Each structure stands twice: as C-alpha cells, then as structure tokens.
Amino acid sequence: MMLDIRYIRENLEAAEAALKSRGAGVDLSGFRALDERRRALLQETETLKALRNRVSDEISLVKDKSQVQGQIAEMRAVSQRIKGLDDDLRSVEEELAAFMLVVPNIPSAATPFGLNEADNREIRRWGAAPEFSFTPKPHWEIGESLDILDFERGAKLTGARFTLYKGCGARLERALINFMLDLHTTRHNYIEMLPPFMVNRESMTATGQLPKFADDLFHLEGVDYFLIPTAEVPVTNIHRGEILKGSQLPILYTAYTPCFRSEAGSYGKDTRGLIRQHQFNKVELVKFVHPADSTRELEKLLDNAEEVLRLLGLPYRVVELCSGDIGFSACRTFDIEVWLPGQNTFREISSCSSFGDFQARRAGIKFREDEKSKPEFVHTLNGSGLAVGRTVVAILENCQQADGSVVIPEALRPYMGGLEKIVDSKK
RNA sequence: GGAGAGAUGGCCGAGUAGGUCGAAGGCGCUCGCCUGCUAAGCGAGUAUACUGGGAAACCGGUAUCGAGGGUUCGAAUCCCUCUCUCUCCGCCA
C-alpha cells in the first residue's frame, strides 16, 4: 500500500483534507467499505482455517482412518468454504490495493498550501546574474555556432527531443558528470552506484511511477521492463524488501544515469534546445534516513545539490513547492532553479524531495532501531545533483563571451584537460 | 540458444515412502551468569506480515520453507506453471 492503511482507517477525514490540499480531489469514501469487508472476510476464513488445522491434527493422531471418515468429510466441506472465501478476499484485496496505489502522498505539515506553481515560495537566491555588453544568446544558438550541439542530427538519428553532442560539448557533459560524482562521493560522503537503466514493474510501482504514470515512461517490447525516468527508481529500490539496521542510517547513494521520459502532454513546450529531452543525463542523490532526521537530511541534500552550482559559479534560487505542485510521491519538495540569461528566466535544474515513508511503505524498506525493536519504515529522500544537460545549458548561457566563446568554470577545468574556454573550432 | 543442478529463518545447513515442522543443528546476535583483562564456558532468548482482544505489557488466530496454482482432511515434502541462481556447451561486448 502507500499510505498507512491503519492511519487512514482511523483518520479518514484528516487524510482526505490533507490530500485535498494537493488540488486533485481524492475520494477516500470507497476505502472504508472495502477495508471493512476485507477484515470481515479475513476473520471468517481464518476462523475456519483454525478449525481445519485443529481437526487435521486430530485426524493425524488416529491410526485407523476409518474411524474419522466423518471429520474428513466435514473438513472437505470446510476446505471448500475456505476456498470460496479466499477468492472473495483476494478480489477485495486487489481492489483495495488498486485503490490505494493511486492515492498520492499526504503533504508534509511544512509544505505551504497553494493551488499551483504560482503559489510556490522562493526561499533564497545565490549569486548575481552576469551582466553582458551584448544580448546574451540562448544555449541552442551558442551550441550550434560553437559546433558542440547538433540538434538536427540528433533528430535524424532518433527524432525530436534527441541531441547529438560533439567534441567539447560531449566532453563538457562528461566532465560535469565526473565533477558532480567526485564532489558528492569525496566531499558529501555519498556512495557511488551504477544501476541498471531499465527496471521491472515492481520497482516502478515501489517509487510511485506506476501504476498512475505509465504514459510518462518508455516501456520495452517483449519484456515487461521500463527505461528509468530517473536514477531515483533503481537506487531507491536497492533496499526494497529489506530490514536495515538502525546503525546503518543514514545511507547516502549517488548515481549517474541517463533518464528517459516520454514527455507525454508536453508537446510544443521547450521545443528548442536541451531543456526538455527524451533522454538526458543526471547525477542523482538518494538517502535512506531515520524518520526523525528526515527534515534535516532534506536540507543537507538540498545544500549538497546547491553546492554544485556554487562551485560552478552559476546563479540560482531555491523554491519550496506548495501543496498543489508537489509530485505524487513527495510530501515536501524544494526546487533549485538556475538563472538562464539567454532566456532571461530561472529554470529548474534540481528537485529535492522528501517522500516520508510513502516509498518505503510501497517498497517495504524498514529499519530496526535496536536489535530488539520492531521494524519501522525508513524515510526516503532524493534530489538531482544535478541535471547534467541543464547544467550545460546554464554554463553556455552564463559564461558566454562577446566573441562567441564560452569560458569554462574554473572548478571544471581539471575535468576538461585544463581547457579554459570553448571557442569555435572552425575559426 | 542447448543440457543439467538448485532455491529453507541474519548466515551456513538438516528435513523428500505428506501429519506432532515456523521448521533439527551450527554460526552470528541480545540478555544474564561465570572468569582479575582477552578467549573459552554455562543458561535463556533471537523471523515477518496481517488480524482479534487489551490503555499498555502482552495474549490469541492466520499466513509465509523462490513466486503462483493444483491434489489432499492435512504439503517445506507430491503435481503443474513461472522467476531467479549455478555448472557445461554454443554465441557474444
């Protein structure tokens, strides 16, 4: 399930009100009847099973089975009855599960109320927008004139929203991946993971992409696998079905993966450039934490992501999403938006969320405080650290020069073989 | 792709002519005892989920021996399907 079924049972109104703050009306009215029916069936069938177990034990003690033909016949009938009840129970449970799997997470009490994007709250800004003596160009123009991004051939190879990186462009992307991974592993204590780029249905369900958002995913033909839309999916699922030791927490993982998104419903949006691609690279940060630490850990994760931008000298702002704008599985989210002078706007480059125990509940990820204590759900968190393609966008636009070249941020130069600026190779 | 072997509790590993097996034994771990430290030794405990009762401690029921079905009064044990792992051959980065 996703939300705590017992919590809902006892706090139906509160849960409904909290879900309502997301905007999308969630109707929990069907829940109570299903839940009650389930428990009634459960009690009935279990009572019969207890009887059958007891009588079967008695039968086993009797050597001469002819003496217990009566009981055997009786139990044969009981078993038939159990079978029927179990069938009913299974269908009720399937219905209940299908219902629960499409109910979103309850927003955190800290999440500000709001209807949509417009109600998001700006938390802080860092860095100053660069000033230009000329009109700054959008990255697609810079990329094409420097001959490092080839949108036309990307479309030829695959289709719209695919891009071919060339020369320094390809190197810049790779440099950023390595720079981010090195930063998070050596300075922020994350463990690097390199997971599969496609996962099964169970993994997608555990983190919340399925069953509701199948349209956003690429599904393979022939096998029931999906291309990952984010490393969050495989990395969070690493501990699916496990009971961790309290002393292991928090667990911090970082992973580079490409991300694949169908972008269904975004036709006509961000059609130019690298902003919205079907395939893009991302370095992800994922945490498994003690519930009591999740707020603090979210702030640290956010700071770890911001650190990338600070080291690169890219101006940004942090926005806290309101209840109407947070994702399905999240209970609290901060977006980091980088300044893009070529488009004169801030664009999301990272999204850092707490999922509370929502994903842990779906995925069955628990921990034991002490040896003797009962297992309880961990909290999961994740955030981009960062979206690599959009970081390239930000560098191209913020670091562009009057002569058309792009100065590489100092922190990145060791990863670029010492290169200080990208110039037009044709000149 | 072809042939074969196997999946048991945190780990190792018993258990296949169906019954008293949630499951021997060992290791590990926890608590206590003992020992001037360490090691060894002794005793007890040590899965999860759902569910009923209880304020709680806790007590009861059901399920789970890869997953799902079947046979049976009764299945870790028999039958079927699937998944995964391992070995050999082929192929391949």
Image: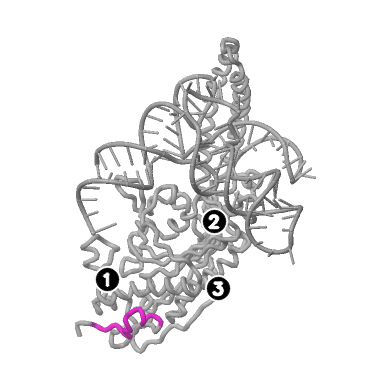
- Name the secondary structure under disc 3: strand
Reply above or below: A118 against A131: above
Q: Does residue A12 appear in this view?
A: no
| Residue ID at (42%, 75%) | A345
Mark 2 vs mark 3: tell me if same chain: yes
Q: How many marks?
A: 3
| Residue ID at (47%, 57%) | A236
> As rendered, which of A148 and A125 lies closer to the eye?
A148
Reply above or below: B50 against A212: above
Of label 2 and label 3, which has the lower sequence position? 2
- Give the residue number, with chain letter if any, for mark 3: A123
> As rendered, which of A173 and A373 lies closer to the eye?
A373
Local packing at callout 3 (Cα closer than 10 Å; few below 14, some 14-19, many 20+) is: few
Q: Quadrant of the C terminus of chain A?
A: bottom left
| Residue ID at (22%, 67%) | A152
Q: Which mark is residue A22?
A: 2
Of label 1 and label 3, which has the lower sequence position? 3
Host chain of mark 3: A
Q: Nearer the viewer, mark 2 or mark 3?
A: 3
Host chain of mark 2: A
Is residue A422 in the magenta section? yes
Q: Position of residue A415 (x, y in %)?
A: 35, 78
- Give the residue number, with chain letter if any, for mark 1: A165
Q: Which residues are magenta?
A: A411-424
Q: Nearer the viewer, mark 1 or mark 3?
A: 1
Q: Amino acid at mark 3?
A: Ile
